[in-house]
């Protein structure tokens, strides 16, 4: 039985991209590689496309022969998520209400206040009863682009840094260290600004399936 292993990591990415203020999410269109890394030493690179009111996260090795979910489309305008299964030309649609965990932290990645990109992180920590102090740490060059670095420390012993790209209005890198010293985060690489083809976000050739069928698709059970 084969379960697609990249989906749990992408839960964070959906939160990253899905803003509760859709107009803000369309500010800049771009594509990039997204390098994810976890405490277990596991590293994965995905493709990220941010277009007009939509975004796409895709495994580079995703092909029509790939079993399970190969890409995720996010509809900013209608607050919808589409989990696509290329092999079977099927998608699972998740509405905003069903996918609320995906949206809870979205504003931490496209800051409401560009002059204080840490505000969302501070508010989220406060909601959990943790005091987080975040301060500017100067400018850095991230993959040839100017970004603003912010360093943070928390009362529970955790720490981290984020790199905010004001041109993209996007946090392009996060490095977190838990109280136990476990590091995780992500980094955008090979960023290319520009209008994204609408065909990237097209589900015309796909048909919808429902949640009860999801395990069948992931495990290869059933006729599709």
Image (cartoon, rainbow, N blue to C red):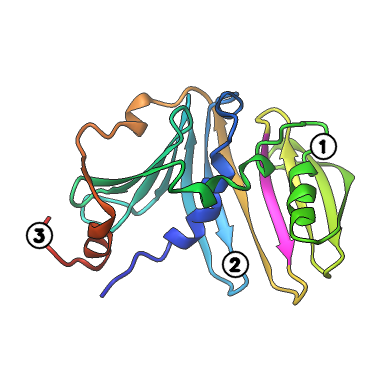
In the image, taking residue 113 as reference, residue 94 lies left or right, namely left
Magenta region, residue range: 170-177
State which quadrant residue 222 falls in.
bottom left
Q: Which residue is mark 2?
A: 38
In the depicted structure, whether residue 165 falls above or below residue 72: above
Q: Which residue is mark 3?
A: 223
Q: Secondary structure at mark 1?
A: loop
In the rendering, at what x and y percent does residue 61 appear?
Answer: 35, 54
In the image, taking residue 52 as reference, residue 222 lies left or right, namely left
Q: Of callouts 2 and 1, which one flags the residue occurring earlier in the amino acid sequence?
A: 2
| Residue at x-position 18% and y-position 50% | 88
Q: Which residue is mark 1?
A: 116
- Do callouts 3 and 1 mark residues in contact (Cβ within 8 Å)? no
Q: Of callouts 3 and 1, which one flags the residue occurring earlier in the amino acid sequence?
A: 1
- Do callouts 2 and 1 mark residues in contact (Cβ within 8 Å)? no
| Image quadrant where one finds the C terminus | bottom left
| Image quadrant where one finds the N terminus | bottom left
Separation (CA) of disc 3 from disc 1:
51 Å
Q: How many marks?
A: 3
């Amino acid at each position: 039985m084969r379960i697609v292993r990249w989906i749990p990591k992408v839960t964070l990415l959906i939160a990253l991209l899905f803003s509760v203020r859709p107009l803000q999410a369309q500010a800049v269109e771009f594509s990039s590689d997204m390098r994810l890394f976890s405490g277990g030493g596991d590293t994965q690179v995905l493709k990220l496309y941010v277009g007009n009111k939509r975004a796409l996260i895709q495994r580079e090795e995703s092909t029509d022969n790939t079993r399970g979910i190969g890409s995720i489309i996010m509809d900013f305008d209608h607050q919808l998520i589409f989990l696509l299964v290329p092999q079977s030309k099927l998608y699972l649609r998740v509405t905003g209400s069903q996918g609320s965990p995906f949206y809870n932290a979205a504003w931490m990645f496209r800051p409401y206040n560009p002059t204080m990109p840490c505000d969302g992180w501070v508010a989220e920590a406060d909601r959990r009863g943790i005091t987080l102090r975040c301060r500017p740490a100067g400018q850095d060059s991230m993959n040839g682009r100017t970004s603003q670095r912010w360093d943070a420390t928390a009362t529970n012993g955790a720490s981290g840094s984020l790199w905010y790209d004001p041109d993209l209005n996007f946090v392009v890198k996060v490095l977190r260290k838990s109280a136990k010293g476990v590091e995780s985060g992500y980094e955008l690489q090979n960023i290319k600004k520009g209008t994204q083809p609408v065909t990237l976000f097209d589900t015309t050739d796909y048909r919808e399936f429902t949640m009860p069928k999801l395990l069948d698709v992931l495990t290869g059970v059933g006729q599709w």
